[in-house]
Image (cartoon, rainbow, N blue to C red):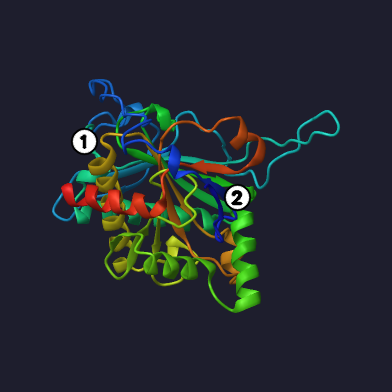
Amino acid sequence: MSELRQDPVTGVTTVLEPERAGRPRDHVHPVEASKDATHCPFCAGHEQSTPPSRLELSLPGESAWTVRVFENLYPALTAGDDQEWPAEIDAPWPYRGTTGFGVHEVIVESPRHDDTLAVYTREHAALLVEAWASRIREWREDGRFASALIFRNVGAAAGASMSHPHSQLIALSRVPEALLKELGNFSQDATESGRCVLCGAMSADDAGERIIFDDGVTAVHSPWAAPSPYFMRIAPRGCSATLADATAEERASLGTALVAAARAIKGALGEVAYNLVVHDAPYSAQHAGLPFHWHVEVFPRMGDQAGFEWGSGIYTNVVDPDVAASVLRAGLALE
């Protein structure tokens, strides 16, 4: 019999239907073969093909950049230095709209075109996380934005238009609805029980042996109410609102956990498309000290959401998270 499960962090309800599951690699969206790097603007030596660097970080002993950040050449949102707030646009009642005010950056993760997260060294992964934290801090200190979202799309099925390894940051003048809902869940649980809802979820997943990776600082879980097959949640063991203020040890640990998650996907499912999203506290919540526990969600692209999911906002998962945890642990062990 199917079950309805709700995640206390996101509030998302999932229908768990393990009877419909096939083999682990059934219904996956594979990553396409890497395109020719000859004209790739993200490769080392092609820097003139992109906007100027806003940040370059190098591994110890390296003179050239390892991670490089610049404005997206085709930004979804923009904000001039002298622009303080989005402007209202003429919209027919009852619609409302503003200009696309915000920041859209590309974070090139490696100078090498064929690199993947699964092969990054611990030092390389830590450097990537340092870049993420730096950009979240940069736009927090700017003062014009409400929140920042970091995401990573791997494969065309996950929305990637470039095969060179990269992630992106978008800073927004408003807090996205999904993040507002999470903030409300953290605040409600803290008010009612005095506890962090994510810390509680992690303890439950520990007890259920749904751990995929854990180094004592950061853990990767297959949550009990995972919304999709082989979904993973990565979070620090210490309760903290923002990656921007993570210590060097915490950043290095997250980097190691990210690599472990990528290797688990590769070992269990092969070269499959996936998305990765960093959930960081809205800037106003950080300033006010509101309860939040930053975390990362990783979801392999397995099939597609259909009419029921779009119409109801309820997800369908055909792989029991306990089974997914076992499969992903085995996949990690293979890599």
Q: Which residue occupies the foreground of this view, 58 or 132? A: 132
Q: Which quadrant of the figure has residue 26?
A: top left
Which residue of the protein is positioned furthest toward the front in this rendering? 1
Which residue of the protein is positioned furthest toward the bottom in this rendering? 194
Of label 2 and label 1, which has the lower sequence position?
1
Q: Which residue occupies the foreground of this view, 188 or 124? A: 188
Q: Secondary structure at mark 2?
A: helix
Residue at image location 48% in from the left, 66% down from the top: 201
Which residue of the protein is positioned furthest toward the left in this rendering? 61
Number of labelled discs?
Answer: 2
Q: CA distance from mark 2 to mark 1?
A: 34 Å
Q: Nearer the viewer, mark 2 or mark 1?
A: 2
Q: Secondary structure at mark 1?
A: loop
Q: Which quadrant of the figure has residue 119?
A: top left
Q: From where the camera sits, is residue 126 visible? A: no
Q: Residues within 10 Å of mark 2 (few under 14, many from 20)?
A: few
Residue 154 coordinates in the image, percent (x, y): 36, 35
Vertical order, 168 against 280 (above or below): above
In the picture, measured across the screen, residue 196 lies left or right of residue 173, that is left
Residue at image location 63% in from the left, 42% down from the top: 313
In the picture, measured across the screen, residue 27 lies left or right of residue 138, that is left
Q: Which quadrant of the figure has residue 243?
A: bottom left
Determine which of the numbered discs, if any, sits on residue 112 in the image.
1
**Three-letter amino acid code of the residue under disc 2:** Ala
Residue 238 coordinates in the image, percent (x, y): 41, 72
Q: Which residue occupies the foreground of this view, 249 or 51? A: 249
Vertical order, 145 against 23 (above or below): below
Residue at image location 45% in from the left, 34% down from the top: 72
Residue at image location 53% in from the left, 72% down from the top: 196
**Three-letter amino acid code of the residue under disc 1:** Arg
Determine which of the numbered discs, if any, sits on residue 178 in the image.
2
